[in-house]
């Protein structure tokens, strides 16, 4: 999204209410518009720039307390540290099998004390920990049978890390006799950097499993291919860590966020009375059409990259069309599409768009979950990383797919309920 050096995302209606007599006093489902004023700070990443800013595949970005940006380039097996002026400060990490070297880096974040942790799946599993200056500190092996981090890795105040969505492994001799319902729960794990085994902090809700693949046969009844079925509108598992260390968890279709303490207990909930949209046939048809359009663009890029023969290209397009045709739809569109907590403790919640292929609204709540207001669709969105003093970083790509990171500063957020 292009912005001028100083951009005001304007809204139509001013807010004049207080916390006790605000939107909730008349209709708590009515949005109270927010105005965000931002300024561009710098952008790093280019196809023809210096070696350090030619990124392979950015897995994550994070800020430290000094406002330095750390870019985790998983393809290049390193972290690039960028100063407040957008210039290179240092890099650390490299490919290899020695201490502090990486083989299959999957997840990254900066701990509250300034250290950086990278989960490397190539050992077969370990956290590589670097100090605030980028010097290798220690390697902490993870028992992957007990839990594996997903791509989202969040630091807790006590130095542990929380994550969900990683691959699940089980031993044939484990004797797990859990119920079918418990089998499709989504585990949220806590990982210690002291060498202790991962622990399941909380088991989040999930939809029951459904058939995940479909077989395509030719006229003679012989199998030509087996493809994975696409899914639409499944509820995501969204996590964020509050300043007090409690984990905010959104795991359903409703606008409801649970607070989970360090012992895995739900201590409370917050949200807004905004109901999920029921998936109609019109929505299913619009979704199929949008997916076909997106897959057509992707397939053209894929065909150029793979240099397929005409027969292979035809089969590829057939597979994509079959995936869309056999898509699995959930019954409702989840209200919440994303969640994060900024350095001021505010909770940002992205809402699903009102139309297929559109952009959704973004709500801002205070640390206690009280609603402050809503940013317009197509305006300021939840960044890939929040930083101190209003810093926000967005991972973007140009028309050629070259990645870059754009850093802005949130100078003001006006219209908040006081």
Image (cartoon, rainbow, N blue to C red):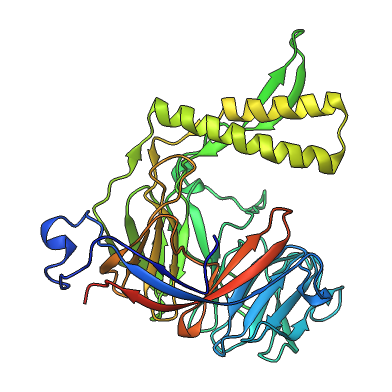
Question: 200 left or right of 95?
Answer: left
Q: Position of residue 70 (x, y in %)?
A: 65, 79
Single out the residue that lies furthest toward the top: 220
Q: Between 156 and 33, which is closer to the camera in this rendering?
A: 33
Q: Is residue 202 visible?
A: no
Question: 221 left or right of 340?
Answer: right
**Total marks placed:** 0
Query: If the image is split into quadrants, where does the N terminus sit?
Result: bottom right
Q: Quadrant of residue 418?
A: bottom left
- The structure residue drawn at horizontal position 74% and vertical position 10%, both measured from the top left corner, is 221
Above or below residue 375? Residue 310 is above
Above or below residue 182? Residue 43 is below
Q: Position of residue 376 (x, y in %)?
A: 37, 58
Q: Between 131 and 58, which is closer to the camera in this rendering?
A: 58
Q: Position of residue 199 (x, y in %)?
A: 54, 68
Q: Is residue 109 visible?
A: yes
Above or below residue 101? Residue 144 is above
Q: Between 191 and 336, which is closer to the camera in this rendering?
A: 336
- The structure residue drawn at horizontal position 22% and vertical position 54%, both measured from the top left corner, is 29
Q: Quadrant of residue 112?
A: bottom right
- The structure residue drawn at horizontal position 44% and vertical position 36%, both measured from the top left corner, is 330
């Amino acid at each position: 999204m292009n912005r001028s050096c100083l951009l005001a995302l304007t809204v139509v209606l001013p807010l004049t209410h207080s916390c006790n007599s605000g939107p909730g006093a008349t209709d708590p489902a009515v949005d109270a518009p927010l105005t965000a004023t931002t300024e561009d700070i710098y952008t790093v990443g280019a196809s023809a720039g210096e070696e350090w800013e030619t990124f392979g595949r950015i897995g994550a970005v994070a800020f430290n307390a000094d406002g330095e940006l750390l870019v985790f380039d998983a393809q290049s097996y390193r972290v690039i540290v960028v100063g407040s002026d957008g210039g290179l400060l240092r890099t650390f990490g490299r490919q290899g099998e020695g201490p502090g070297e990486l083989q299959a880096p999957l997840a990254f974040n900066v701990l509250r004390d300034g250290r950086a942790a990278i989960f490397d799946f190539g050992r077969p599993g370990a956290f590589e920990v670097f100090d605030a200056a980028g010097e290798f500190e220690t390697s902490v092996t993870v028992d992957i049978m007990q839990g594996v981090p997903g791509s989202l890795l969040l630091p807790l105040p006590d130095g542990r890390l929380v994550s969900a969505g990683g691959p699940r492994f089980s031993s044939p001799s484990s004797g797990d006799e859990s119920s079918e319902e418990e089998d499709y729960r989504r585990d949220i794990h806590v990982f210690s950097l002291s060498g202790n085994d991962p622990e399941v902090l909380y088991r989040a809700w999930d939809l029951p499993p459904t058939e995940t693949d479909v077989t395509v046969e030719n006229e003679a009844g012989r199998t030509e291919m087996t493809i994975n079925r696409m899914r639409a509108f499944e509820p995501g598992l969204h996590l964020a860590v509050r300043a007090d260390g409690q984990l905010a968890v959104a795991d359903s279709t409703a606008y409801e966020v649970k607070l989970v303490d360090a012992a895995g207990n739900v201590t409370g909930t917050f949200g807004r009375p905004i109901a999920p949209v029921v998936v109609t046939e019109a929505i299913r048809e619009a979704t199929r059409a949008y997916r076909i359009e997106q897959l057509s663009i992707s397939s053209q890029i894929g065909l150029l990259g793979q240099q397929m023969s005409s027969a292979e290209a035809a089969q590829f397009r057939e597979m994509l069309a079959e995936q869309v045709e056999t898509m699995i739809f959930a019954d409702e569109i989840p209200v919440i599409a994303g969640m994060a907590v900024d350095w001021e403790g505010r909770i940002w919640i992205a809402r699903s768009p009102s139309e297929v292929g559109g952009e959704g609204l973004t709500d801002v709540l205070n640390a206690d979950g009280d609603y402050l207001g809503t940013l317009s669709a197509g305006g300021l969105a939840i960044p890939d990383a929040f930083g101190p003093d209003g810093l926000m970083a967005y991972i973007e790509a140009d028309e050629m797919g070259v990645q870059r990171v754009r850093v802005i500063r949130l100078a003001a957020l006006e219209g908040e309920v006081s």
